[in-house]
């Protein structure tokens, strides 16, 4: 088991990608500190994965003092921290002219400042054991989406904060990010459960479906493991090829037949 005798903190660990990561690490032998703001969900998940080997910590990621207590609780219980997965976050919708300053600050506080503060508190302990940090960013952090100004800015910040921490704190620890595309989580049901929205996604989802949370968890576990021992400062995009697309029309659908496609290729190259 890759994570036997390892201790992993997963923030936002009670649903979606966080829950899938918790289950993946537990299944590979880790003791998992499951941090979330919902006590009922925490109790359910820790019970599911084996109880006493793991620890549930109720955490409001807006409060640095509570984040401090999360780190202290992990150390008090297990005596070490090997991996921090900064997964907790929030979405946001609205253009710059439509969101107010309080909303902007809340998005930045949860999506960026909490990553900074949890990392700051964990790094001294991770350094002692050659540990790692995996930050959950987003495909929305590497390009822009219509109407997601705050979220785009926050996730882009997470990606570059990842790089900064990776070079500042190597070789003692490794810091990487995972950038999921559309993923079938409870928080995304407004998208994945809406036929109109999914029809709009159809041309850009090369895999023709959203990711499952377990698929994102696999990438997280890889970056945290010794299999990625020389991977540092990397942003692993897990979006089924969505951002591989240039944005140009799908000529294979618009133009039928090889002769038409050859003409289109020639026109594009000009």
Image: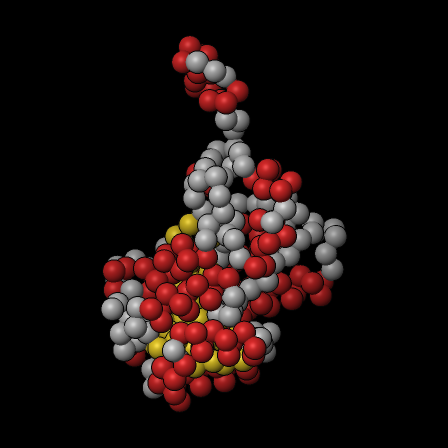
Query: Of all residues shown, which one is farthest toward the top?
Result: 259
Residue 15, can we see it? Answer: yes
Toward the viewer: 121 or 208? Answer: 208
Q: How many marks?
A: 0
Q: Is residue 64 left or right of residue 230?
A: right
Q: Is residue 135 left or right of residue 100?
A: left
Report x, y in % for residue 14: 51, 70
Tell me if residue 101 comes above or below residue 59 in the rendering: above
Residue at 32% x, 74% y: name it. 30
Residue 15 point in image, percent of width and height: 52, 66
State the scheme by which the image is colored. secondary structure
**Residue 20 % position (x, y):** 44, 63
**Can residue 116 be seen in this snapshot?**
no
Instruction: Identify the residue shown where x is 63% and y is 46%.
Output: 194
Kindly give the residue lying farthest to the bottom in the view shown: 76
The quadrant of the picture occupied by the N terminus is bottom left
The percent position of residue 172, horizontal first and vertical second, equals 29, 71
Q: Is residue 103 above or below residue 201?
A: below
Report which quarter residue 131 is drawn in. bottom left
Please state if 227 lies on the left or on the right of 158 as rendered: left
Q: Residue at x 52, y 53 (%)?
A: 184
Q: Nearer the viewer, residue 161 or 256?
A: 256
Q: Measuring 28% from the left and 59% from the top, which residue is drawn there?
A: 228
């Amino acid at each position: 088991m890759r994570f036997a005798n390892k201790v992993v903190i997963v923030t936002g660990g009670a649903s979606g990608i966080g829950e899938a990561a918790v289950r993946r690490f537990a299944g590979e032998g880790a003791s998992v500190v499951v941090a979330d703001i919902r006590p009922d969900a925490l109790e359910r998940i820790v019970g599911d994965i084996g109880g006493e080997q793991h620890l549930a910590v109720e955490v409001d990621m807006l409060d640095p003092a509570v984040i401090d207590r999360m780190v202290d609780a992990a150390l008090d219980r297990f005596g070490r921290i090997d991996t921090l997965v900064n997964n907790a976050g929030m979405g946001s919708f609205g253009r710059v002219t439509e969101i107010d300053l309080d909303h902007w600050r809340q998005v930045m506080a949860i999506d960026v400042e909490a990553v900074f503060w949890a990392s700051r508190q964990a790094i001294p302990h991770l350094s002692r054991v050659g540990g790692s940090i995996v930050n959950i960013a987003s495909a929305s952090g590497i390009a822009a989406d219509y109407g997601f100004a705050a979220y785009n800015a926050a996730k882009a910040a997470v990606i570059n904060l990842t790089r900064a921490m990776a070079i500042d704190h190597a070789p003692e620890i490794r810091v990487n990010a995972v950038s999921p595309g559309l993923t079938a989580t409870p928080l995304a049901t407004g998208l994945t459960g809406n036929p109109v929205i999914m029809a709009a996604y159809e041309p850009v989802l090369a895999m023709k479906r959203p990711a499952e949370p377990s698929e994102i968890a696999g990438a997280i576990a890889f970056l945290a493991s010794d299999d990625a021992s020389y991977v540092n400062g990397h942003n692993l995009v897990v979006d089924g090829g969505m951002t591989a697309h240039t944005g140009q029309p799908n000529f294979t659908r618009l133009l039928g037949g090889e002769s038409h496609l050859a003409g289109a290729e020639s026109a594009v190259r000009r």
